[in-house]
Image: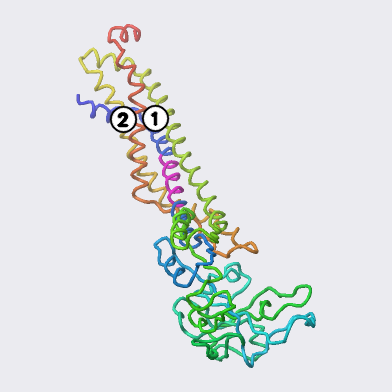
Amino acid sequence: MNFVKRAGLSLVARRGRTAILLGIFLVVCTLLLGGFMLRGATDRQEAEAQRRIGVDVTVKGDRLTADAAAKLGASPLVERYNPLLYVDSRAPGLKLVASDAPRPPDSGPADDGPGLTGIRESAMLLDFATGHASVVEGRPITARDAGRRVVMIDQRLARKNGLGVGDTIELTAAPEGKGPRGLPREGASYDIVGVFRDTRSGTAPGWQEPAQLPANQIYAPLGAVSTLVTPSSPGAGEGGPLAEAVYKLASPERAQALHADVKRLLGGDGLRFDVNDKAYRDQVEPLRKVGAFAGVLVWLIAGAGTVILGLVVTLTIRERRAELGMLLALGERKGKLIGQHTVEVAAVAVPAVALAALAGAVLGPVAGQRLPATGEVAARPGRPQVEPLPAPDMAMRAADLGKVAGIGLGISLVATVLPGIGILRLHPRSILTDSE
């Protein structure tokens, strides 16, 4: 009789043992599939964390100009970037918020201006990223506003002057600023496109210049304020040195490559390269730990399943010594006897994988919803605010099921071939004599 057919008859005849094998395989395959699904979910969450959070790199240097910052921003390593240029300007007709303390006599003439900063994207400013500031009216400044004469102003400054979105303000250079060929620089009108609220009071012991108060901060596109830059300002013209530039990277590993590009472009003298990956690591490290745990769990389950099934097969072989002796006496080859046990175990593994797939499809999404979403640590004060990542997507993938099927087949082979080595040492006469 064909050993495959004999394996099928044996499974039917020994329903109890078949049920035990099926139960063991079902538990092993379900746990394996759960481990693969969990590891896949953490990998997808890590990729989502890279997309949402990233890493902030701040570059400062005497040779950092708007053109150099743009070249670095065009690198494939960079997701977004934001150059910063602090401008000493004046705002004729604009009433500035004053410090609570009286102005000291030795502070110079009361010709003060607002705190004007040229930027590319307001969302990348530290105050907005950490939640200290938020847009309450209108819209933020984006990269699409490059060169447009638009501004964002603080809510307190807007209320003091009765301004809102759609109104205009005039900004000029500081009195000592000179334009091309020594001519005085002319002012320009800027449209208010956004009003933001800064939660910081800005009060400090003693008097502060109006430009240093958070309530007097004004943000405008970098190109729109280049004509207001004076020779004494941090950036002498649009091509002059910037105060700093912030670059958003997808992962900390890219920071090293960007550092090499920065040194090659700007040189190493007076260069400062700071990497802030705290928010990224706060969310990614727990995910990596869960993924590593899931990987270890998969191998532990596979090893335990192999050992348990190997013991069951070993006991089965001992119980069926008389049957094996009769088959050997009838001329059956020992290799086919081992093949029969392998087919019996593998035949049980197939429905076990199918049932595990059904359980994974039904229970996977439910388990994913019960797992906590990461991202709570980013809500702490002083850290960049990041929208919490959703709960892990415990969806079953075809690749996960294929891995489970492959491991299940490997378990079947190992659990039957190793105990089957004892069959090679069996002798029909001794077996039949012992059974009498």
Q: Is residue 311 left or right of residue 85?
A: left
Residue 289, can we see it? yes
| The residue stretch that appears in magenta | 29-41
Quadrant of residue 350 within the rendered picture = top left
Q: Residues within 10 Å of mark 1 (few under 14, many from 20)?
A: few
Q: Amino acid at mark 1?
A: Gly
Residue 219 in picture, x, y percent from top left:
56, 79
Residue lying at the far front of the rendered structure: 181
- Near-viewer residue (120 or 24): 120
Residue shown at 49% from the left, 43% from the top: 292
Q: State the residue position of label 2.
A: 344
The foreground one among 74 and 404 is 74
Q: Residue at x 29, y 23 (%)?
A: 338
Location of mark 1 (residue): 16
Q: Along the line of sight, which residue is nearer the eye, 410 or 245?
A: 245
- Residue lying farthest bottom? 93
Q: Is residue 365 visible?
A: no
* Above-or-below relation of 99 to 431: below
Label 1 element class: helix
The mark found on residue 242 in the picture is none
Question: Is-magenta flag for residue 316?
Answer: no
| Side of 116 relative to 322 (left or right) | right
Determine the image quadrant of residue 301: top left
Q: Dominant secondary structure of the magenta stretch?
A: helix
Answer above or below: position of 246 versus 259.
Answer: below
Judge depth for marks 2 and 1 and give the one in front.
2
Q: CA distance from mark 2 to mark 1?
A: 13 Å
For the point 34% across and 33% down, the residue is: 410
Near mark 2 (Cα within 10 A), the count class, few <14, some 14-19 or many ≥20, is: many
Q: Quadrant of the C terminus?
A: top left
